Image (cartoon, helix red, strand yellow):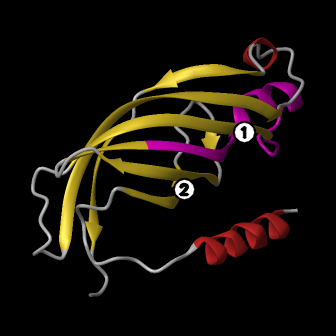
């Protein structure tokens, strides 16, 4: 199953790749794909988690752009505490897997935008919704968090910095 998923992601990346243009501004609309590993921050032990995101970037002015994005990811952790309570040993862990789908809008600001340089730093701030759906959780009676919220929506505020780098002329 995992090999098939990784092959499909690799094939999609090959199909979607296109020639880049050697300019940073006056682009109108541009799009792209992002793939990141996640570092789960919770009371559980972290496992490999990921998120992929596609986006469209609409130029509003030389220094402002509106970015709309949607993605898919998996948030994976191991619950060692409740495994210890259930089995009486530290040799077991209970896997918790959650699918996540973020939908967001970001205002991207490039205050030092120039076509004469080979890099273009920017920062962004936005708002978004995240749908989560717990796909695999242990049936643990001592842990009420497994029986409360299996799926739902939550809000988030994406904030960050980045850079675009011109690869060639």
Place of residue 94 in the rendered image (x, y in percent of width and height, measured from the top left): 80, 38
List x then y, in percent, for residue 156: 46, 26
**Whether residue 79 can be seen here:** no
123 vs 25, nearest the viewer: 25
Q: Is residue 100 left or right of residue 105?
A: right
Residue at 86% across, 15% down: 141
Instruction: Give the quadrant of the N terminus.
Output: bottom right
Q: Can residue 117 be seen in this view?
A: yes
Q: How far apart are marks 1 and 2 (CA)?
A: 14 Å
Please tell me which residue is depicted at 37% across the width and 38% down the height of the picture: 106
The image shows residue 117 at horizontal and vertical percentages of: 12, 74
Establish if 165 lies above or below 86: below
Res. 23 image quadrant: bottom left
Query: For residue 77, which numbered disc appears in the image?
Result: none
Q: Which of marks 1 and 2 is nearer the N terminus?
A: 2
Q: Mark 2 points at which residue?
A: 37
What is the quadrant of the C terminus in the image? Answer: bottom left
Residue 33 within the segment the image draws in magenta = no
* Residue found at x 43% / y 35%: 105
Q: Foreground residue, 145 or 111?
A: 111
Taking depth in this image into account, of 12 and 49 the one nearest to the observer is 12
Can you identify the residue that label 1 sits on?
99
Q: How far from the left and from the top, in percent, is residue 95? A: 78, 41
Placement of 127 over or under 1, stated as above or below? above
| Magenta-drawn segment | 68-93
Q: Does residue 72 belong to the magenta stretch?
A: yes
Q: Outermost residue, bottom direction? A: 169
Asked if the residues shown at circle 1 and circle 2 are in contact, with their CB atoms under 8 angstroms apart, the answer is: no
Q: Which residue is drawn at 52% across and 57% down?
A: 36
Helix, strand or loop status at disc 1: strand
């Amino acid at each position: 199953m995992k090999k098939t998923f990784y092959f499909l992601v690799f094939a999609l990346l090959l199909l979607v790749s296109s020639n880049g243009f050697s300019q940073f501004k006056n682009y109108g609309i541009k799009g792209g794909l992002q793939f990141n590993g996640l570092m789960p921050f919770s009371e559980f032990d972290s496992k490999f988690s990921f998120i992929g995101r596609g986006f469209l970037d609409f130029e509003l002015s030389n220094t402002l752009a509106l970015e709309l994005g949607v993605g898919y990811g998996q948030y994976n952790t191991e619950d060692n505490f409740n495994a210890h309570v259930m089995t009486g040993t530290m040799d077991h862990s209970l896997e918790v897997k959650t699918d996540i789908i973020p939908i967001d809008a970001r205002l991207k600001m490039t205050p030092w935008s120039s076509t004469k340089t080979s890099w273009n730093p920017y920062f962004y701030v936005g708002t978004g919704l995240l749908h989560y759906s717990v796909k695999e959780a242990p049936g643990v009676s001592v842990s009420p968090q497994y029986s409360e919220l299996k799926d739902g929506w939550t809000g988030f505020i994406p904030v960050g910095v980045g850079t675009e780098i011109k690869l060639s002329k």
